[in-house]
Image (tube, helix red, strand yellow):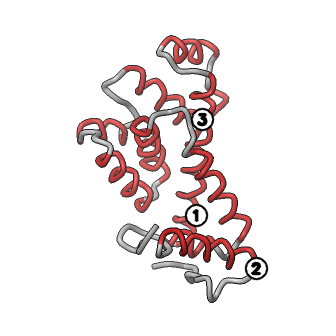
Amino acid sequence: MPRLTRLTPDTAVGASRDLLADLASRHGRLGDMVSTMAHSPAVLGGYLQLSRAMGRAKLDRGTSERISIAVQARQGCGLCLEAHVSAARALGVDEEEIDRARAGTSADPAIAAIITLALQIHREPTSITDEQIAALREHGYSDRAMADVVGVVALNVLTGAFNLFAGLTPGSDTGA
């Protein structure tokens, strides 16, 4: 059961009204998360900016979605997990790899290593070692790609924590 009311461009005020109006004009309808985030124009604006920025990440989408699945499986946001599993499937990630991502790994050693990094960033960034970074470079990850992992994790923490706080659950979202 949602804990906060959804806002619309008609019920929001100030910057939130403008952000929601822009989203509605571009997407046609508003999802529960952004409509609820609009209670804080700072949170909504920050989410939208980080989300757009991460769209330009160096990581390929399949890897990014697997990272998101691993983080959300631990964070516990069913709404986010469902969305990232759906996105991974749309990208052609098979069910075995989706299950591995839920477990925090991959059959591909390079993807397993970057998921491990993401989970360490999420729970204990002080545990990351220089040797681990060197191994990621040997797998072909650039400094930019590794830095982008921090952004993917941060975006997942923001959306998952917000949805859990706001009481948004799978099946309650009605749009983008």
Dot 3 lies on which element?
A: helix
Q: Mark 2 belongs to which amino acid?
A: Gly
- Which mark sits nearer the N-terminus, 3 or 1? 3
Which comes sooner in the sequence, label 1 or label 2?
Answer: 2
Callout 1 secondary element:
helix
Residues at badges 1 and 2 in contact (C-beta under 8 Å)? no
Q: Amino acid at mark 3?
A: Asp
Residue under circle 2? 14
- Secondary structure under the numbered disc 2 in the rendered image: helix
Q: Quick check: 23 left or right of 71?
A: right
Q: Is residue 125 above or below residue 85?
A: above
Front disc: 2 or 3: 2
C-alpha gap between disc 2 and disc 3: 32 Å
Seen from the viewer's position, the closer of residues 52 and 81 is 52
**Within 10 angstroms of label 2, few (less than 14), some, or many (20 or more) residues?**
few
Residue 51, percent from left and from top: 58, 52
Residue highlighted by disc 1: 162
Asked whether 88 or 80 is in front, the reply is 88
Of the residues under marks 2 and 3, which one precedes in the sequence?
2
| Residue 96, percent from left and from top | 24, 37
